Amino acid sequence: MIKYIYVFLTIAIMTSHPVYAQELSQQAIYHAGMIAKNCAPIWDNPNCIRSVGDSNYEFLSIYGAQLQYMKKDVFAENLKNSCAASTASRTDPVPAYALRSAMIECANAVSDISGKSGITPDLSHYQLMVAGTICLAGAPECQSIMEQLKSYAR
């Protein structure tokens, strides 16, 4: 599953017209800027880890609220249980490898929940989450991801 997400994000970032992408939401724009500011050039630093956790938290809070509004409480609870660890870095020191692992689990859960519930999250913010997993892994594709994110830095 993560290979599918990785390929999807790589295609979306490498093309001028992202596949399945949507215009960036205001939340995604804000967090893309903060991540670009705090994570370049080293992703394994406390400010970066905190910024990624903040981004995950806002994305998941909004998606969870969507699910609850649409009376999909079982899916909202599954989201909370599957993704809590991906937001822990907001308040506690978390090693980059642990955050990446939690984000992979969460991204896969979001994909499953979206498919089963029929409720789609903010795809631009979802892509930002997946970008974080790629960059926290130190993948070569992170360089082009960071170039994209830098355009949102304030």
Image (spheres, rainbow, N blue to C red):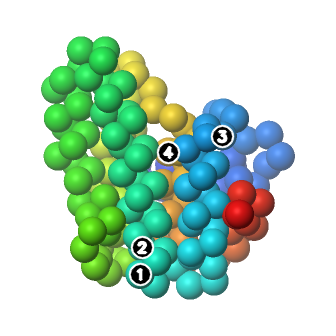
N-term mark: 4 or 3:
3
Q: CA distance from mark 4 to mark 3?
A: 10 Å
Quarter holding residue 152: bottom right
Residue indicated by mark 2 = 49
Residue indicated by mark 1 = 46
Q: Secondary structure at mark 1?
A: helix
The residue at the point 25 percent across, 73 percent down is 92
Q: CA distance from mark 4 to mark 1?
A: 22 Å
Q: Secondary structure at mark 4?
A: helix
The residue at the point 36 percent across, 25 percent down is 66
Residue indicated by mark 3 = 24
4 vs 1, front mark: 1
For label 1, the crowd category at 10 Å Cα-Cα, with few meaning under 14, some 14 to 19 and many 20 or more, is some
Quarter holding residue 124: top right
Nearest the eye: 66 or 7: 66
Question: What amino acid is labelled 4 in the image?
Answer: Tyr
Instruction: Give the vertical position of 15 relative to 70 (above or below).
Output: below
Residue 94 x, y percent position in the rendering: 29, 77
Q: Quadrant of the C terminus?
A: bottom right
4 vs 2, front mark: 2
Q: Secondary structure at mark 3?
A: loop
For label 2, the crowd category at 10 Å Cα-Cα, with few meaning under 14, some 14 to 19 and many 20 or more, is many
Question: What amino acid is labelled 3 in the image?
Answer: Leu
The residue at the point 38 percent across, 19 percent down is 118
Among all residues in the image, which is located at the extreme top?
A: 71
Question: What amino acid is labelled 2 in the image?
Answer: Ile
Residue indicated by mark 4 = 126
N-term mark: 4 or 2:
2
For label 4, the crowd category at 10 Å Cα-Cα, with few meaning under 14, some 14 to 19 and many 20 or more, is many
